């Protein structure tokens, strides 16, 4: 497989960067020459992935391009960065073009947030592959809404409409769709429009999913939407040992041994894990309601909060909650893969970022879906309505400010109790465990994702010889 050079250009938000780093490891382990393009402030985020490929025929190479713009993973989609979004990413264009011109790779896999890479790849006669960071169901659902505008046929924001022409009858409301009308999002929306156009003319799409998870939507995307697509996931499964899992993305903010001892002291499926990912902001009042709800439902829990949020906790509550070993609060980065893979963990309260959903499925847990932004409402529908491995937190709205708010403690308590329940929760977990097994098989030699990865490599090589 030598002489095939794949260049990856990840977007720097964690939900896009982490799976692309795993993807680079997959390519390098297949013997491909693999280069990741990134900027100085993000370069260190790939060092773990590079280390993993030290003994491969080609170690992952890093191409660091200059950037004066604020592009750090921790702030790229923050309110301060979003208004200058288009300019921030455009500044990367010239150095990338220069690199592509000099290195002439076989293909360029670039995140959807870099629409101009389609035109650039065409200039050098190489295929541009799009990475959206989400699964097939969300891709199909959002395209259906874009094309048929079913939300315009209902008379209120809370009246449900059916997403047209999908294999299942899935209902949404206008409240659950993105609303980015504020001036601050003007730039960002322009990039999204350009991304749709660039998608249509790019060579194909690479998806972090597996066929057995959403077969109707893999088929719909390919046959009805006529897109060339390869599913190669769950890419997180390339992290096999404890170290790889615990340091994925960032170093965890807890002592790993102590943490594992705590987890191991708990019975199977007795711990619920709560996390809202990297972009969602949980308001102070919501934090309080979650704390009260957790305290009331009396389950073992691991709860991740962001740095600084600890000061919003009601006085004495954290001490009470963590006394007698019932709960753990992680302030900062949690080793999410390690947690979800552990047999003590049986439930996951999630904002439904696609990586979290896939990691939950790969861990065989039942989920409480609590979507907030982006395509999370579609992912939530996949979990509750199609896969039936989770319950919804209730009637929450898409939040332009990325803020998670408005759910009271009783609702939190009831939803957690349902996924941890020995009958209802266990039934969801049983289905999730079937998917977990299928995910494992999909990435093993001969599995559907393994075969699609190879099909992708063959296609790229054949493109070269055309
Ligand atoms: N993640 C983690 N620890 C944390 C927060 C996030 O390991 O404390 C990882 C998580 O496992 C996932 C990614 O960061 O791989 C977040 O991506 P996702 O699509 O779930 O959500 P986003 O942060 O993009 O909203």
Image (tube, rainbow, N blue to C red):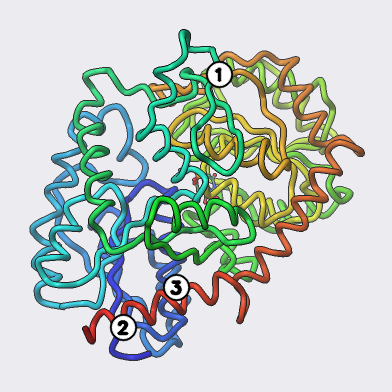
Q: Earlier in the sequence, mark 2 or mark 1?
A: 1
- Residue 346 seen anywhere in this rendered image of the structure: yes
Separation (CA) of disc 2 from disc 1 = 46 Å
The residue carrying mark 2 is 461
Q: Earlier in the sequence, mark 1 or mark 3?
A: 3
Task: Tell whether circle 2 marks a residue whose Cβ is less than 8 angstroms from ligand 1.
Answer: no
Number of the front mark, 1 or 3? 1
Label 1 element class: loop
Residue at 54% in and 59% down: 247
Q: Quadrant of the N terminus?
A: bottom left
How far across and how far down the image is residue 20, in percent?
A: 40, 61
Label 3 element class: helix
How far across and how far down the image is residue 196, in percent?
A: 27, 44
Residue at 64% in and 66% down: 242
Q: Quadrant of the C terminus?
A: bottom left
Give the number of the disc on residue 441: none
Nearer to the camera, 76 or 145: 145
Q: Residues within 10 Å of mark 3 (few under 14, many from 20)?
A: many
The residue carrying mark 3 is 25
The residue carrying mark 1 is 160
How far across and how far down the image is residue 271, in percent?
A: 79, 42
- Residue 262 seen anywhere in this rendered image of the structure: no
């Amino acid at each position: 497989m030598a002489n095939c050079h794949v260049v990856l250009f990840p977007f720097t938000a964690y939900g896009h960067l982490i799976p692309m780093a795993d993807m680079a490891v997959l390519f390098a382990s297949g013997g491909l020459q693999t280069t990741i393009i990134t900027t100085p402030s993000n370069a260190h985020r790939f060092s773990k992935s590079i280390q993993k490929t030290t003994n491969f025929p080609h170690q992952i190479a890093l191409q660091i391009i200059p950037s004066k713009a604020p592009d750090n993973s921790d702030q790229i989609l923050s309110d301060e960065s979003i208004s200058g979004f288009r300019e921030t990413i455009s500044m990367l264009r010239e150095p990338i073009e220069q690199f592509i011109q000099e290195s002439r790779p076989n293909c360029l896999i670039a995140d959807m947030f870099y629409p101009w890479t389609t035109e650039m790849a065409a200039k050098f006669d190489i295929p541009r592959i799009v990475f959206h960071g989400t699964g097939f169901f969300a891709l199909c659902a959002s395209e259906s809404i874009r094309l048929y505008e079913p939300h315009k046929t209902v008379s209120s924001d809370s009246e449900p409409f059916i997403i047209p022409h999908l294999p299942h009858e899935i209902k949404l409301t206008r409240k659950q769709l993105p609303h980015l009308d504020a001036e601050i999002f003007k730039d960002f929306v322009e990039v999204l429009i350009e991304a749709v156009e660039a998608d249509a003319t790019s060579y194909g799409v690479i998806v972090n999913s597996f066929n057995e998870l959403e077969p109707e939507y893999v088929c719909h995307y390919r046959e009805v939407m006529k897109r060339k697509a390869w599913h190669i996931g769950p890419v997180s499964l390339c992290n096999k040992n404890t170290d790889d899992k615990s340091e994925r993305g960032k170093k965890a903010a807890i002592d790993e041994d102590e943490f594992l001892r705590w987890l191991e002291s708990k019975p199977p499926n007795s711990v619920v894990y709560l996390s809202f990912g990297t972009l969602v902001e949980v308001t102070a009042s919501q934090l309080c309601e979650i704390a009260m709800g957790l305290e009331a439902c009396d389950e073992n829990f691991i709860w991740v909060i962001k740095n600084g949020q600890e000061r919003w906790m009601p006085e004495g509550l954290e001490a009470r909650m963590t006394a007698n070993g019932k709960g753990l609060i992680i302030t900062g980065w949690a080793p999410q893969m390690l947690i979800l893979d552990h047999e003590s963990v049986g439930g996951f309260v999630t904002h439904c970022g696609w990586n979290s959903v896939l990691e939950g499925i790969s861990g065989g847990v039942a989920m409480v879906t609590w979507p907030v932004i982006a395509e999370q409402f579609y992912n939530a529908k996949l979990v509750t309505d199609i896969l039936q491995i989770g319950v919804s937190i209730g009637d929450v709205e898409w939040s332009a400010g990325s803020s998670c708010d408005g759910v009271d403690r009783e609702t939190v308590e009831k939803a957690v109790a349902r996924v941890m329940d020995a009958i209802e929760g266990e039934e969801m977990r049983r289905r999730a465990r079937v998917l977990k097994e299928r995910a494992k098989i999909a990435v093993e030699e001969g599995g559907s994702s393994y075969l699609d990865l190879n099909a992708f490599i063959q296609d790229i090589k054949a493109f070269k010889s055309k």
